[in-house]
Image: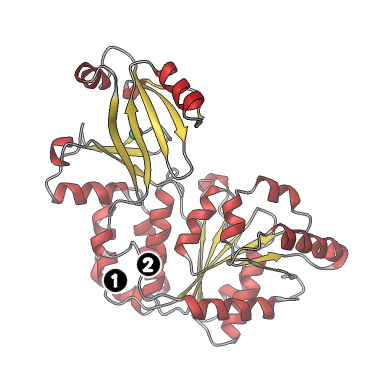
Amino acid sequence: MNHDTRSLAQGVLVGDRRSLARALTLVESARLADGAAARDLLSRLRASRRPLARIGITGPPGAGKSTLIEQLGLRLVDAGKRVCVLAVDPTSSRTGGSILGDKTRMMELSRKAGVFIRPSPTGGGPGALSARARQALEVLASGPFDYVLLETAGAGQADTGVADLVDVLVLVIAPGGGDELQGMKRGVRELADLIVVNKADGELLKLAQSTAADYARSVPAAEHAATVSCCSALEGQGIDELAQKLSDLAGSRVRDEWPGTTPAAAGALGRLNHVALAAPDLAKAAAFYRDVLGAEVSAPKALPEHGVTTVFVRLPNTALELLEPLGDESPLSGFLDRKPKGGMHHICCEVDDILAARDRMREHGVRILGDGEPRTGAHGLPVLFLHPADCFGVLIELEQSSA
Ligand code: CO
């Protein structure tokens, strides 16, 4: 596909809807061929990026997020703000039903001048979404908007990744959502700035109030304690107050700098995911970590395509990956020939965008093992290995971050 990124960038800067839509399609594209054009577009836009307030709205399905976003958006527009909405669905591909796919949703907001609404990007597998959502936000931040409302589905692990992308995170729940609370990853509650019990109207009003009280009790009294409130997007109750809280919070937080999105940081190393240790006898090594060192140890998992069996040792801040050779062609055999007792085999760090990371390595003359195409690693996410001879003797694994 041929992309005129210069005119596309110009269209984005003035908020031309068609250009915005095309630019988002480009950065959301999973196609390798579009990667270079997407990076070119983003670097053009970076020069002109403006500060805008990024509000994340997350919560389980059925909490009424879309209705709430529409009401919030209308309040902001009435207050003279320019608003765009981006929906990100970390859990399902398009076939699972995109969040805003129903055109009747946000009808009123979408008719307002200057408002831009973008439904869920297409799927493309886990891991790629965080990087793409970040880039989609970058595109929107270059347009003439004051607020971007980022809607995400579900209330699982992916939401904690969304927290990194926004200035203010709102968790929306339905009255009596105690079951979701149980299943919800602890992190989401703790990362939320505001917890809103929606649908506080009619017969559900009392239940909503008691749910809010339950949440207020369950939120740990840390320095970063979320405010819990009720609202009814349907009846418009509590929305003005919510909009006010959001604008206060956003006003104190909006950053000019976007960490991790400068060109120098494209493909840069993120968190340490694990340190891998080769062991000649996996069962013995796992027992040692479990019984002697007192760590939590997973069941063994065979990865025939990598020629290893793995056991994960979970530590509070990272993990150890115990590796035993599997099959005749195991890449671990040579290592254990040299070090029969075992030893440190590789380190694994996360990257936001594994293809950008690969480009970055190649630009610096660092060789990628194998054919250079990412393979599926132990966590079901794309991984690459860098040649140890180019990395001061250390085998480095890069894993696409999952959030
Ligand atoms: Co590894």
186 and 340: which is toward the camera: 340
Name which residue type carries label 2.
Glu
- Whether the residue under disc 1 has CB within 8 Å of ligand 1: no
Indicate which quadrant contains ligand 1.
top left
Q: Nearer the viewer, residue 278 or 98?
A: 278
Check the picture and name the quadrant holding the N terminus.
bottom left
Q: Quadrant of residue 45?
A: bottom left
Q: Residues within 10 Å of mark 1 (few under 14, many from 20)?
A: some
The residue depicted at 27 percent of the width and 59 percent of the height is 265
Q: In this picture, is 242 found above or below 296?
A: below
Q: Which mark is residue 189?
A: none
Q: Secondary structure at mark 1?
A: helix
Q: Locate residue 365 relative to residue 268 in the image: left or right.
A: left
In the image, 250: left or right of 241? left
Instruction: Check disc 1 and give the amino acid type.
Output: Arg
Q: Quadrant of residue 329?
A: top left
Between the residue at mark 2 and the residue at mark 1, the CA separation in whole angstroms equals 8 Å
Along the line of sight, the residue nearer the viewer: 277 or 138: 277
User: Horizontal and vertical percent for residue 305?
Assistant: 34, 23
* Residue 138: mark in rendering: 2
